[in-house]
Image: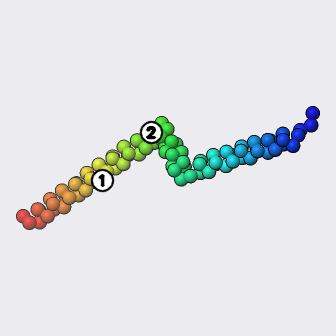
């Protein structure tokens, strides 16, 4: 049984509706907010959280070492200054 003009027109309208839906989905997924949400989701997986936590711990350790080094340097400078005065 051959397709009628009405059948062809229905198929064309269905194809147009599908295409419009696909374009809407693509437009929505490329909006900056959607991209940010996707990026946030990627950052929240366990592996990345472990990396972030490790980086924070390393940063705290480095900060503590820098502060300790600065204190030791200040103590040496103060000791030298006091020795010069006596």
Question: Who is closer to the viewer here, 73 or 14?
Answer: 14
Quickly name the residue at label 2: 50
Instruction: Identify the residue at the far right of this view.
Output: 1
Q: Nearer the viewer, residue 7 or 31?
A: 7
The image shows residue 16 at horizontal and vertical percentages of: 74, 47
Q: Is residue 56 left or right of residue 14?
A: left
Where 51 falls versus 81 (above or below)?
above
Cα–Cα span, label 2 and label 1: 24 Å
What residue is at 67 percent from the left and 45 percent from the top? Answer: 21
Q: Earlier in the sequence, mark 2 or mark 1?
A: 2
For the question of whether residue 39 can be seen, the reply is no
Circle 1 Cα neighbour tier, 10 Å, few/some/many (<14 / 14–19 / ≥20): few
Name the disc covering residue 66, or none: 1
Which residue is depicted at the point 76% across and 44% down? 13
**Left or right position of 54 against 67:** right
Residue 47, percent from left and from top:
49, 38
- Locate residue 56 relative to residue 86 in the image: left or right: right
Task: Between residue 83 and residue 16, name the one nearer to us.
Answer: 16
Q: Residue at x 79, y 41 (%)?
A: 10
Q: Position of residue 58 (x, y in %)?
A: 38, 46
Residue for point 51% across, 46% down: 37
The quadrant of the rendering that contains the N terminus is: top right
Q: The residue tagged with tag 2: helix, strand or loop?
A: helix
Query: Which colour scheme appears in the figure?
Result: rainbow
Say which of marks 2 and 1 sits in front: 2
Q: Residue furthest front?
A: 6
Farthest top residue?
A: 1
Examine the rendering and report whether any part of residue 55 can be seen.
yes
47 w.r.t. 75: above or below: above
Residue 82: x and y in percent read 11, 62
The label on residue 36 is: none
């Amino acid at each position: 049984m051959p397709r009628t003009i009405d059948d062809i027109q229905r198929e064309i309208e269905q194809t147009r509706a599908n295409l419009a839906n696909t374009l809407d989905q693509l437009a929505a997924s490329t909006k900056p907010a959607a991209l940010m949400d996707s990026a946030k989701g990627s950052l929240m997986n366990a592996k990345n959280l472990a990396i972030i936590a490790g980086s924070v711990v390393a940063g705290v350790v480095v900060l503590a070492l820098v502060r300790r080094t600065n204190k030791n340097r200040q103590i040496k400078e103060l000791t030298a200054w006091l020795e010069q005065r006596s």
